[in-house]
Image (tube, coloured by chain):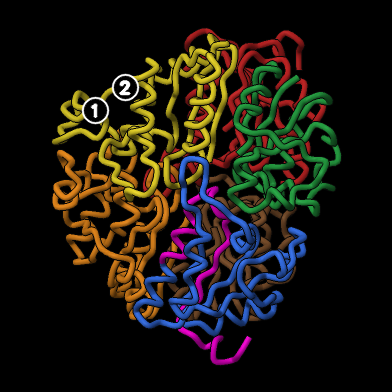
Chain colours: A yellow, B green, C red, D brown, E blue, F orange
């Protein structure tokens, strides 16, 4: 089956990101297709490239990036939710006159239309909230 | 038939919203803090979904709730969670 | 509630109050985007989300816009199926006359039916 | 005498926690989404703090609740909020 | 509950369950820091926070540590005043025998007194 | 009187930051001393220097920085809560081998001991949660 994941909270604030990551890994292990993980609301913080959690705790940002690269799963971050929360890639940083970026590939900033498209295109959309 | 997931404890009003949204054959899976609902004292709150109530093994275990879980609750692991989403037509998340 | 509406593509559930958090705004944003892509959208207000419909809302004291201006635009986006959890209205003691838009009350059984009959359900 | 602030609606279980923490002279100020508690239909929930219930003017106003506010609720603006924190020995926030 | 404990400096209220959010961990971190600075600390577990006391907690499936190891260290920090909302225990159907540490149940009146008698109250 | 503010949620996610900012301004207008604003839990996101909210919405990060500068109010960000959430100043970025920083003065990363100190030193600690 084709799945999409919607993640609505930051790592380290609630368990939502941990649950979403494990569920997505289980989907892939079972041979399902994951057409995308969409990060919305505080879920955009999963793309924070500067996150530096203690070394004895799971590193969610790195884990998502690895999953995205290894399984070619698009990691789509809502651009409107991200900008107001301080998550900018280089292009957006330049556009807003800010030095430096807080989001980098494989995370990509994109519009909400992608969420609607994913949700209607896939067989299942599974949401993880705070 | 839909799968509803709930990650809030039965002390939260979100449980009432989830129950309001459930059809007669829908299933309810407790995850994260929602597994507090697997405690025996909470089962009265779940009467309307008797036989259709599930809880995630890993979340029960990490909270020390596995041995306290009410017998009527069906315990599934993350693979079981995936299987429930396959069997059900859609999933709705309550948080 | 008409049967053709129930079969619409997208059901967006709004359970949070205006101003207090961004949930309501972010839920409405999804609805508007879906409508702009020609999807049929139904909104279901539950619990505190029902207060989003109250007349006379204003900007916050720091100029926060709130969500009333967005609700006022729903018709322009052809979003005209606005449903409200009847039990939530009772719990808050609110009536339809206090709302800025015409809505339809729905009971628990209808809510379950709505969830079952929409291709995509997003819960905010 | 303490000041308690509450930013959750009376539909939330947090209200019960706030009420549990309130002494016989303490005051309760509703702010943010908490001002939904100023609706007349909610006043039964606040019986134990009758005469000691406040709500923030600006938060009522932005939500369209100012004209619906129950008469027993004392409406204060942000300066009134500051004054309450001056008069009360300490403030405890429930959220 | 002894009177000298009630007069202690800091009351930390813990209302959130372990693993589900970082509130419990971050509340406990404040308690540990205060104790390390030689402040007397009382912990009050309310609502879902009471489940933090359950025996047999484990790391999460991704290696999340949870808060049980921190609770096991409280004695080392001389934090030995652990109070539990009696009404919350009833609501959850839990008893003290299921807890990893000895605690004392408190009623609503005692909770209000605790809040009134501590120099600093932090609510998590 | 001497006040301290504890802010526990991010701007744009809940109203907490808006309430805290207005309350702090009202304190200063009335002549009270504000010994510090402490940012903890998701409140650390108030220090996100890359935040780019829409121009017709209040810019909370800039507003805090201005208040801090104009009234010499220390803006103290819990370092442990900040690091795991991707909020690093230049020193911490260097320490963790990250390029670029997401926190800059007048916000300062500091330990939780400061919160306890502020809370016990001031006449009033007012908390704003999500």
Q: Secondary structure at mark 2?
A: strand
Q: Position of residue F1 (x, y in %)?
A: 34, 80
The residue under the point 40% across, 82% down is E39
Which residue is denoted by mark 1 in the rendering? Answer: A89
Q: Which residues are magenta?
A: E1-29
Is the same chain shared between marks 2 and 1?
yes
Residue C11 occupies which quadrant of the picture?
top right
Q: Nearer the viewer, residue D94 or D76?
A: D94
The answer to whether residue D58 is above or below residue B76 is below
**Dot placed on the residue nearer the N-terminal end, 2 or 1:** 1
Find residue D73 and report its horizontal and vertical position in percent. 64, 64
Judged left or right of residue E29, residue F29 is: left
Residues at marks 2 and 1 touching, judged by CB atoms closer than 8 Å: yes
Relative vertical location of residue F45 with respect to residue D49 in this rendering, above or below: above
A23 relative position to F22: left or right: right
Task: Output the chain of dot 2.
Answer: A
Quarter-wise, where is residue A104 in the image? top left
């Amino acid at each position: 089956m084709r799945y999409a994941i919607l993640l609505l909270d930051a790592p380290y604030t609630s368990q939502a990101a941990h649950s979403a990551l494990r569920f997505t890994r289980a989907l892939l292990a079972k041979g399902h297709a994951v057409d995308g993980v969409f990060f919305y609301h505080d879920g955009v913080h999963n793309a924070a490239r500067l996150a530096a959690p203690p070394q004895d705790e799971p590193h969610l940002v790195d884990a998502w990036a690895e999953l995205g690269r290894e399984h070619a799963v698009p990691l789509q971050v809502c651009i409107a939710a991200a900008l107001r929360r301080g998550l900018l890639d280089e292009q957006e940083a330049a556009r807003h006159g800010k030095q430096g970026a807080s989001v980098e590939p494989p995370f990509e900033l994109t519009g909400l239309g992608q969420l609607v498209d994913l949700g209607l295109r896939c067989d299942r959309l599974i949401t993880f909230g705070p | 038939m839909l799968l509803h997931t709930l990650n809030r404890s039965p002390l939260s009003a979100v449980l009432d919203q989830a129950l309001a949204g459930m059809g007669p054959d829908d299933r309810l899976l407790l995850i994260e803090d929602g597994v507090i609902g697997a405690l025996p004292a909470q089962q009265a709150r779940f009467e309307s979904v008797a036989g259709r109530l599930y809880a995630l093994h890993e979340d029960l275990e990490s909270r020390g709730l596995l041995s306290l879980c009410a017998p009527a609750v069906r315990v599934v692991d993350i693979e079981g969670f995936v299987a429930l989403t396959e069997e059900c037509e859609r999933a709705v998340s309550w948080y | 509630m008409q049967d053709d509406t129930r079969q619409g593509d997208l059901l967006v559930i709004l359970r949070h109050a205006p101003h207090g958090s961004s949930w309501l705004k972010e839920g409405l944003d999804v609805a508007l985007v879906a409508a702009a892509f020609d999807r049929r959208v139904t909104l279901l207000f539950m619990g505190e989300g029902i207060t989003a419909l109250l007349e006379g809302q204003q900007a916050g004291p720091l100029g926060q816009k709130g969500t009333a201006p967005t609700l006022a635009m729903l018709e322009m986006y052809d979003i005209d199926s606005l449903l409200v959890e009847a039990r939530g209205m009772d719990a808050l003691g609110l009536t339809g006359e206090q709302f800025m838009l015409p809505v339809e009350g729905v009971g628990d059984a209808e809510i379950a039916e709505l969830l079952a009959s929409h291709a995509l359900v997003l819960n905010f």
